[in-house]
């Protein structure tokens, strides 16, 4: 419960998070007094060859200390991961998709171990398929999908797992245009909730989207689109604030957490900060 309150506090403090680099959030001193600023820990020495073959990555480091025993070296730098994602999206948008890493040879190559270079938290919406819109294949992306791309403990744990054990160096929270979950939350807050949703768990989902929905400026031209971007930024903030391990990696430059918006019409993914620059 204390953790939940802390997250709410972080959100209240970071209501304008969409305009702030996450590095700035931490460096600006918005720190929880109950969570001391993380200090760099000694990291397991990465192998000389960063992109280990799946079979090599699967071998346990028997002589290593417990913390290092199952940690995976970074797949690529966070910057390279971002470039790879955006280049794939450009191919998709331009009709030049190559559908890489989708054949039988790739299936066999990644069957014993995976090294996804990026983690994508996005909506369960049937029109937002990360492997398609980023033109990636088997073993490339660690994908977590839940309506409204919200963060709870299970989602946070999944992201931590990908970063610590699979070497993923980029986390992208991807909201999308005309998101039904975000719209339902806005409608409910406006007293226009769908009676069909009574006696369901949909309210629990809306509760996680509510902070972003309530942060939409009253003069926003498109309240739904503003809420979509704020909700993605809010989730990125929740990931940063909610996991000391991930926060440490971000501050050490080993992990990047970004928020972005997917356009259903033209297929383009736009990082939130870039949209505002
Ligand atoms: Zn959605």
Image (cartoon, rainbow, N blue to C red):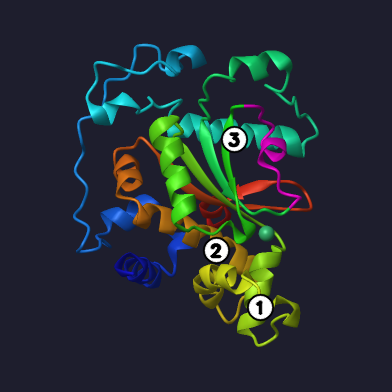
Q: Quadrant of residue 95?
A: top right
Q: Earlier in the sequence, mark 2 or mark 3?
A: 3
* Residue found 71% across the figure and 48% down from its top: 128
The span from disc 2 to disc 3 (Cα, nearest Å) is 21 Å
CB atoms of marks 1 and 3 within 8 Å = no
**Residue at (41%, 43%) from the top-left corner?**
160
Where are the magenta residues, as a range? 126-138
Identify the residue position indicated by label 2 in the image.
231
Which of these two is toward me, 52 or 197? 197
Report if residue 90 is visible in the image: yes
Secondary structure of the residue carrying tag 1 is: loop
Regarding ligand 1, which quadrant of the image does it lie in? bottom right
* Label 1 to label 2: alpha-carbon separation: 25 Å
Q: Determine the residue positioned at 66% across, 66% down.
A: 181
Within 10 Å of disc 3 (Cα), the crowding (few <14, some 14-19, many 20+) is: many
Q: Is residue 131 magenta?
A: yes
Check contact, mark 2 vs mark 3: CB within 8 A: no
Q: Is residue 221 visible?
A: no
Figure quadrant of residue 190 = bottom right
Task: Using a 10 Å C-alpha cutoff, classify the residue at mark 2 as few (fewer than 14 neighbours), some (14 to 19) or many (20 or more).
Answer: many
Task: Say which of marks 1 and 3 sits in front.
Answer: 1
Q: Is residue 127 above or below residue 107?
A: below
Q: Which residue is mark 3?
A: 85
Q: Which residue is mark 1?
A: 199
């Amino acid at each position: 419960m204390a953790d939940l309150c802390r997250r709410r506090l972080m959100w209240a403090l970071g209501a304008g998070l969409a305009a702030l680099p996450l590095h700035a959030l931490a460096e600006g001193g918005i720190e929880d007094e109950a969570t001391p600023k993380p200090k760099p820990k000694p990291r397991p020495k990465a192998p000389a060859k960063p992109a280990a073959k799946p079979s090599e990555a699967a071998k346990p480091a028997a002589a290593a200390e417990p913390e290092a025993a199952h940690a995976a070296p970074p797949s690529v730098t966070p910057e390279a991961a971002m470039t790879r994602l955006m280049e794939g999206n450009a191919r998709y948008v331009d009709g030049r998709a190559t559908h890489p890493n989708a054949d039988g040879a790739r299936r066999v190559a990644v069957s014993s171990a995976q090294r996804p270079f990026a983690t994508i938290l996005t909506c369960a919406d049937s029109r937002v398929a990360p492997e398609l819109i980023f033109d990636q294949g088997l073993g490339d992306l660690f994908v977590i999908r839940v309506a409204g791309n919200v963060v709870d403990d299970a989602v946070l744990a999944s992201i931590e797992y990908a970063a610590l054990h699979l070497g993923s160096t980029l986390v992208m929270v991807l909201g999308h245009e005309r998101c039904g979950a975000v719209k339902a939350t806005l409608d409910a807050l406006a007293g226009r909730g769908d009676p069909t949703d009574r006696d369901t768990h949909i309210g629990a989902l809306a509760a996680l989207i509510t902070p972003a929905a309530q942060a939409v400026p009253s003069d926003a031209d498109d309240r739904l689109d503003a809420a979509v971007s704020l909700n993605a930024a809010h989730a990125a903030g929740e990931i940063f604030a909610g996991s000391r391990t991930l926060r440490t990696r971000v501050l050490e430059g080993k992990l990047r957490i970004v928020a972005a918006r997917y356009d259903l019409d033209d297929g383009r993914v736009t990082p939130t900060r870039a949209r505002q620059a």
